[in-house]
Amino acid sequence: MTKDVYKKEMSKENGQQSFGRMSARFENRVKPKNIKETITRLLKFSKQEIYRLMLVLAIVLVTSILTLSAPRIIGFIVDQMNEGDFSSSLLNKIGILFVIYALISLLTWMSEVLVVSASQKIIHHMRNTLFKKLSKLPIAYFDSHSHGDIVSRFTNDIDNVSTVMSESTTGLMRSVVTVAGSLSIMLYMNIYLTLGVLMSVPFIYGLSKLIAKRTIQFYKMQQKYTGMINGKVEETVYGLSVIQTFNQEEQFLKNFEEANENLYEQGRKAQLWTGLLMPVLNVINNLTFGVIGLLGGYLVIKGHVTVGVVSSFIAYSRQFVRPLNEMASIYNSLMSAIAGSQRVFQVLDEIEEPIHGDALKDNIISGKIHLNHVHFSYIEGKEVIRDLNVKVEPGMKVAIVGPTGAGKTTVVNLITRFYAPQKGQIFIDDHLIEHIDRHWLRQNIGFVLQDTYLFSGTIYDNILYGDLEASMDDIVSASKIAGAHDFIAKLPHQYHTKLSYGGMNLSQGERQLITIARAILMDPKVLILDEATSSVDIKTEKVISKSLLELMANRTSFIIAHRLSTIVSADLILVMNEGQLIESGTHESLMEEKGFYYEMYQIQTQNQSQIAG
Amino acid sequence: MRIYKRYLKKYKGMFSLAILFLIFEATADLMQPLLISKIIDDGVKLKDMNMVSYMGLMMFGVALLGLLSALVRNYLSTHVSFNFAKDLRKELYEKLLSMNLTQVEEIERGSMINRLTFDVRQMQLFVNGTMRIFLKAPFLAVGSFIMVMTLDRKFFWIYLSSLPVMVIVILINMKYGYPKLAKIQVKLDHLNKKTIEYLNGIRVVKAFNRSEYENDNFEKVSDDLKNVSTHAMQFMAIFNPIILLAANMAIVILLYLGRDWVAAQEISVGQIVAFINYMTQLMFATSVMSRVFSMYIRAKTSSTRIEEVLLMTTREESNDALITEEDLKQGVVVKDLCYRYGQGELAINHMSFALKPNESIGIIGTTGSGKTTLINLLMGILVPNSGEIWVGSKKLSPNNMKSFRKYMGYVPQEKILFSNTVKENVLFGQINDEDHLKNVLKLASAEFVFDMVDKQESWIGKGGVNISGGQKQRLSLARALMREPKFLILDDSTSALDAVTEKNVLDNLMLGQNRSMIVIGQKISTVQRMDKILVIQNGKIEGLDTHDNLLRSCVAYQEIYAAQMGVIQ
């Protein structure tokens, strides 16, 4: 039954996946099918720490043997006392016990220290691997997954793995050794008493298995809902101004409570089952004592064993059962680690953005771009680009115009290889774009996106992002070209003004200017400006466009803009509507055509002349 | 921890009950060594099989009672701790919803999310723990002490000798462990922040080919977290072995001294065995306690972070001075408004103006002149440093903001939509009226919705279909119009629209004149259609008048005009 639920869960996730855009691409990804596979993968992450862990194992082995021998020695001491022998050999035994206890503490400490450093390194490795993986995933992945949920995998899920690793590694090793050791000593001492102790084993095994089976699915759900809550909080923080001005707090709270209730339900169930384990095992423990007391008492009276044997047996049975308990509870917490690591592996198994191709790698791009019968759709059956044919010669200034939703930004997404066309080819400098190294491509294409994004840090840091080796002078001159220098100079700390998260202390327009400066600093051979100045006032825009024109002189450039005034000087104007290229040419030729472009231009100039009139 | 008093009260009954059963459970545990010593001393030694079986059965009985208590306690503790966590999350989220933008910035997004999940979980673990092993441990410790005393007074000093060591260890742990653990949480926040920023800026990262650079940056944060965690946990690793040592040494001392006592027949061998058992229990209890303290420390850190959010003063809804439609009909007056971001210069510099009922005002000004800040103040998203806003006869305050917002429609500059269907995004809490919805979509020139595969039911946002910036803008306009607002605010909301669409949208907006409107625009052609134009520069009002008058009198406006005309010529 558990398996079915698990499967259902998986297929549900698949369902969600196909909801995203690149469903077909993600279909064939590998998934950790079962617990064993996940554990194997977890162990692979531990490979680099193998020597440290081996050392720990050795120490634990010694410690466990010492721990095992202590009750036996106490047993000898007790027996000797019972026999009324108080000679110096008794003192010797006590001395040995002292040394053993001291060693146990020392070794325990050493193994803990080693385990902490090993497990932290493993987790660190896992975290970094996950992050590196992100940088290899296609944009489609980020467009279709909740960021809050991804973040949750970095914190909540990895933390789960980390807790279990650092707390359970030595525990598990110690348990195994102790169980084996105490069992053999008990067998050596008395077989009947041992059998009495062993009665507890099937109960412990069955119970922990039963409980673990239940908990894994609850843990998985718990982690999933934690991710969902993360996503909701993220979205709420982002859209808070809208939520508040629309008085939608209650609605959002209600939505949140739903996810919250789910998290509560699943978490509570997981905890109920896990919490069951310890007390039940404790009782089995105590029952075992009862068995030993009864059986041992009987055997002593019959004269088969000594009192000393019974007293050490009690200690051994404790040492035998407790690690068994420990193993059982480790098994359970392991389930939460597995649930966590499965969510991490899920990301690691996503299909990466292909990098391949070294055509052109060492060349300098000339900027010739050719789109040949390109078709593209984000979701199947809904083409946003239809049979697009465009030839751009090096150094050309190309403007893309058209109503919103015409597919202008999608063209940019294709040229930059954020997305790949379903049909048709794109050539850069006569090479198929798929054959070109992606990094190389992006090194040569600079673009300013419609949605401005600045990182926290200073303005300086953000502009520097365009060219990490740039000097302060470079940054200032790039800012001057972008028209950003004036307002930056007025800020209290100028270029070293800190941007708060999302850059709230700057206006949208100012942020756009910074992103333009960032792109200018990069000095790319192909420059793409997607609505780069939409929030900038027209007066400022006019100043920038002059310097931008100079900048574009020797490079291929694409400009997407609604203000037709910024595009009249383009060498080639592409007029798009509903994913198709409907007109192209220069401003003059298009005006003569008296088509779509002409009309659009008329409306804008009409607006202008209305002012003038 | 005072904010938790409420919760304590709420779950007082269940909590006490859980503790009670915990005590039963612990008592059952404590009985075991006593019973065993009885079996050895009274049964085995005297070769009394009846006594042995009687005591053995007693042990079974006690064990079963222990189980029963444990089961009840498990249910109760789980119930309380998970409800507590749920309530806490809800309260935090509720608080978040009522915070203003400055407060959100203060906490930071990454940290906010961590507080709602990670920190709440720490608290939950702790609360659950108190009802489980944590209280059991001290109880066992005290219990084992009493039991030892009943064995023989001689054991008292031996037992006591190990105690100071344990107490000192726990105290050191608390004093030095706390700051170390607190540091982990801070580093975790950094990690969260870094990841969120990376995800949100992924296009920029890819565009500038900065994956390597970002990986390096992340690794730095990740290294930090690793180092801090390793250091803290290695520091904590010393305490358990010491406790272990203290308890074991007590056993050694007992055996050493016990030689003479047994020889002198002052104590029995059975008593020594029992003592060793109790010592083991004490050791177990103490090592659990030391773990409890490290959990307590973690919980304390989390608790401080949660409190920080919960104790923020946000508006409270009160019933006085609510803004009514009557007030709205008397217009809005802004008096001497000032606002600055942090320690910066005044972003809004002593602004005063009035908006007559059903009047429309266009706002124009250079980039960074304070246009968005002004309307954020009007909408209560930001709280002014000084100055007042009056709606009719009532002064706007955080208390009556909600009643004002009831009449408001707002289209933000950023294209904020939520992960949901188109319909839910546009309805956004309004009652579903198909005709009205269709009409509104038409008014906002958002007919493209009907061409989508799933029409109004299409999913947008994360995991949904890709729509362009202009389409998002039109949907967010439709969302505002859906409410038939009496007071409509457009923050440069047509920037991503082409000229034709923009004209249609504005035409539609001008039709229904039964509302006040504030429209921020870059183009004179946009704001010129309003009754009046407010010209802003450097946070100051340069003019508020009609287009024609401004052209004659306002220098700033003339400059903007010249710039825009110049472009076209």
Image (cartoon, coloured by chain):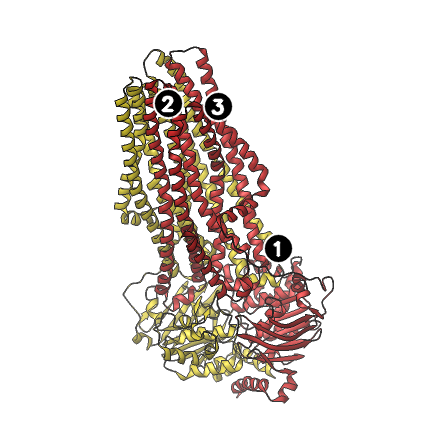
Chain colours: A red, B yellow
Which image quadrant is residue B275 in?
top left
Residue B77 vs B98, above or below: the answer is: above
Q: Amino acid at mark 1?
A: Tyr
- Describe the element under mark 3 as helix, strand or loop: helix
At label 2, the amino acid type is Val
Crowd around label 2: few <14 · some 14–19 · many ≥20 (10 Å): many
Between marks 3 and 1 in the image, the one whose residue lies nearer the viewer: 3
Numbered marks: total? 3
The mark lying in front, picked from 2 and 3, is 2
Where residue B90 appears, as percent x and y from the top left, is: 36, 56
Discs 3, 1 touching: Cβ within 8 Å: no
Query: On screen, A156 above or below B357?
Result: above
Chain under disc 2: A
User: Tag 2's secondary structure?
Assistant: helix
Determine which residue is flagged by label 2.
A310
Marks 2 and 3 sit apart, C-alpha to C-alpha, by 22 Å
What residue sits 36% from the left and 81% below the top?
A: B514
Q: Nearer the viewer, mark 1 or mark 2?
A: 2
Q: Chain of mark 1?
A: B
The residue most toward the right is A363
User: Which residue does the numbered mark 3 point to in the structure image?
Assistant: A100
Q: Give me the C-alpha separation between circle 3 and circle 1.
A: 52 Å
Residue bearing mark 1 = B213
In this view of the protein, which residue sits in the foreground, B61 or A538? B61
Location of residue B482 by image quarter:
bottom left
Pointer 2 and pointer 3 on the same chain: yes
Is any atom of residue B10 visible in this view? Answer: yes
First-in-chain label (2 vs 3)? 3
Using the image as rendered, state which of residue B495 and residue B326 is in the foreground: B495
Distance between mark 1 and mark 2 Cα atoms:
66 Å
- Whether pointer 1 and pointer 2 mark residues with C-beta atoms closer than 8 Å, the reply is no
